[in-house]
Image (spheres, rainbow, N blue to C red):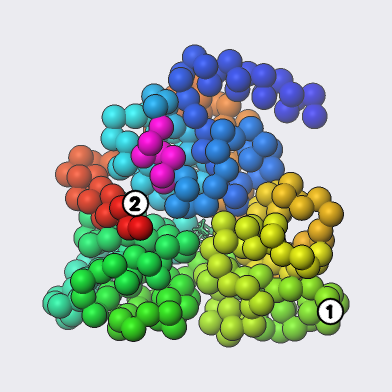
Amino acid sequence: AEMNRELREKLITLKKERNAIILAHYYQRDEIQEVADFRGDSFLLAQKAASTDAETIVFCGVHFMGESAKILAPNKTVLIPDERAGCPMADMVNVDGLRKMKAQYPNAKVVTYINSSAEIKAETDICCTSSNAVKVINSVDSDEIIWVPDKNLGHYVQQHTDKKLIIWEGYCNTHDMLTVKDVVEMRALHPGAEFVVHPECRPEVVAMGDFVGSTTAILEYCKNSTNKEFIVGTEDGTGYQLRKDSPDKMFHFATKFLVCPNMKVNNLKKLVKCLETMQPQIYVPPAIADQARVSLERMLQVK
Ligand code: 13P
Ligand code: SF4
């Protein structure tokens, strides 16, 4: 506790010196969410990165999030506490594979989940996050959509649009781990609880949800619900905001495995260190960034 106090004081000084803001995804460790200027889901944090006046953005999340921030704010310095915090789902699609799919479906437009690399975004018509996926798809002027890389979110979106999705086979290792059996067991233990679930989970698990939505949608739902008890089908870090919003409610994570190890690579110590050393910085080759920016900015403009 004493060490964290010292680290937090150091952070305040460094933030002023570097004219920095700290953005933290809801899946980050509590000690990071506590000191962030903004906590948010992928969409809100991308918006913040695009609109901030700060010179330095410290992005506490996984690599593709820092990359998206750098693409949207190319003149700013974007730091991440640890370069090794990647997203396995983002790595499940490669440029060659996507180009082959585009050649196979020449009339389709490519909609890419923000959980992807800059190179993939550069091959994309428009990006989306889990909070705006259906809106984005419906805004595209094509009936055929190549969807990368999340098959589970793709399956969910397909149920909410008339367009035809051609779905890539990627998935989030963390959300995909949750099974029907896990949820059945939790419901038996907590019969009064509502099950809230992220659409990155398997279709058969999502189908069990009393509420299905992105991280922010789940937080909003639980805050406003008159129910007092929830089984949570998304990453464990959301517990910080859920409990902050509703100290009187009970939140049971559906399994103890709903932890994204990559999100937890960051900690307060590394956060302070990256602002001190101004390393590691995100670099995106300008030619890739310019192409990728088009797909991200289109997403930000969808109403
Ligand atoms: P959202 O923040 O859009 O809910 O995305 C979830 C996720 O898995 C981020 O890595
Ligand atoms: Fe990637 Fe899943 Fe971790 Fe999000 S929770 S960063 S999608 S592995």
SS for tag 2?
helix
Q: In which quarter of the view is residue 184 placed?
A: bottom right
The quadrant of the picture occupied by the C terminus is bottom left
For the point 34% across and 29% down, which residue is it? 76
Q: In which quarter of the view is residue 193 placed?
A: bottom right
- The residue type indicated by label 2 comes to Leu
- The residue type indicated by label 1 comes to Pro
Coordinates of residue 269 in the picture (x, y in percent): 63, 31
Please give the residue where the numbered disc 1 appears in the rendered image.
191
Coordinates of residue 188 in the picture (x, y in percent): 83, 82
User: What is the magenta range?
Assistant: 46-52
SS for tag 1?
loop
For the point 33% across and 70% down, which residue is it? 137
In the image, residue 165 above or below residue 221: below
For the point 52% across and 70% down, which residue is it? 200
Q: In the visual, does 278 lie left or right of 296?
A: right
* In magenta stretch: residue 283: no
In the image, residue 80 above or below residue 110: above
Please give the residue where the numbered disc 2 appears in the rendered image.
300
Name the residue nearer the viewer: 8 or 164: 164
